[in-house]
Image: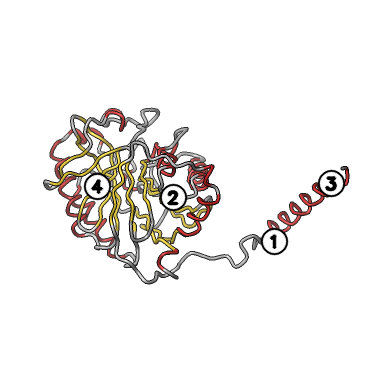
Amino acid sequence: MKRFDYYKAAVCTPPVSIGNPKANVDDMLRILQTLDPDTQLVVFPELAVTGYTCADLFYEDILLKEAMTQLVRLAKQAPANMAVITGIPLNAGTRLFNAAAFLFDGKVLGFYVKRHLPGYNEYYEPRWFSPARDLDVSGVKVNGVDVPVSGKILFADETTDAVIGIEICEDLWVAVPPSSDHAQAGANILVNCSASNEVIAKSGYRRDLVSGQSAKTYSGYLYCSAGPDESSTDLVFSGADLIAENGRILAETASRESITCEIDLQHLNSDRLKFKTSLQENREGYTIVSYASVSLESIELTRAVEAYPFVPEDLNRRLERCETILEIQAQGLATRLKR
């Protein structure tokens, strides 16, 4: 398949050692080496560098400094042509934030800061973190280099036309998710670094949220959640990972370390041109970070391509579709005859 038609992404849930950034980055690097070399974007869970369930350890300066040291190591040792997104606690200005770092070609290119912090039921994030609205700086220094920090930041690959927007866990569950803003600002690949715990009936609702958001935004949506190693007496995690495209779930798992699929950028961009009035452009307040990946002649296509996309393979669904078509035609004809 031609390179410009598809964008290959992986969603990965590694083992986690709580409060041990070096061990966690070791596992991320190991997983990166197992992925197909033509993979262009890799996503890890919320606070994956330290672990999500560190609790009051987030107050410890030694943990925060080690997390940044290991993030820099991850950036330098990751495969050169793979963009990597991973969660990390970020000390910026006078506050601590739940953030996601974007890494490419040995560099930390930027940080997205979580906008919505859950402080209900079993969640206590406001105890440690501040929301993006409290951000009082526009950047932080990483190895002496100024790196942008924002709740409104996109990463644009000039080689592939992929524009990537990030949100973190709870951001998706609110009335107006940040990913909706990202899509209006031009993002066609949306990423969610998450630590979504398991309760009865939640998995189906979460799946519907992901597929529905990808449909509303005409985007590819990559959802990466924390795995079983984060489980405690209060919370149980399963590593529920999902890849969706324009309302369709392309890949999902709750048992493997990684899933990979190709996003059809050409299809998404075509839909955006067609339905442009329902996705009005608005880049106000956004920081756009550009980078250029290495151009690939082709990628291995692993997703299924339906030969007859409007004809369901399942017989019962096909009969239901035919009945619907007949009813639509009959109703139109009946109305016409009345006139």
Q: Secondary structure at mark 3?
A: helix
Which residue corresponds to the image point at 48% horizontal and 64% vertical from the top-left?
303
Instruction: Please state which amino acid type lies under the numbered disc 3.
Output: Arg
Counting residues from the start of the chain, the first of labels 3 and 2 encountered is 2
Q: Is residue 63 left or right of residue 128?
A: left
Q: Earlier in the sequence, mark 2 or mark 4?
A: 4
| Residue type at the position of mark 2 | Tyr
Give me the C-alpha separation between circle 1 and circle 2: 29 Å
Quadrant that contains the C terminus: top right
- Where does label 1 land, which residue? 315
Image depth: mark 2 or mark 4 in front = 2
| Badge 2: residue crowd in 10 Å (few <14, some 14–19, many ≥20) | many
Q: Quadrant of residue 151?
A: top left
Q: Nearer the viewer, mark 3 or mark 1?
A: 3
Judging by the rendered image, the residue that carries numbered circle 3 is 336
Q: Position of residue 5 (x, y in %)?
A: 45, 64
Name the residue carrying label 2.
221
Q: Residues within 10 Å of mark 1 (few under 14, many from 20)?
A: few
Q: Quadrant of the N terminus?
A: bottom left
User: Is the residue marked by circle 4 packed among few (<14), some (14-19), or many (20+) residues within 10 Å?
Assistant: many
| Picture coordinates of residue 239, whole percent (x, y) | 39, 49
Q: Position of residue 82 (x, y in %)?
A: 29, 60
Cα–Cα span, label 3 and label 1: 32 Å
Q: Earlier in the sequence, mark 4 or mark 1?
A: 4
Q: Which mark is residue 49?
A: 4
User: Whole-Å distance between the Cαs marked 4 and 3?
Assistant: 64 Å
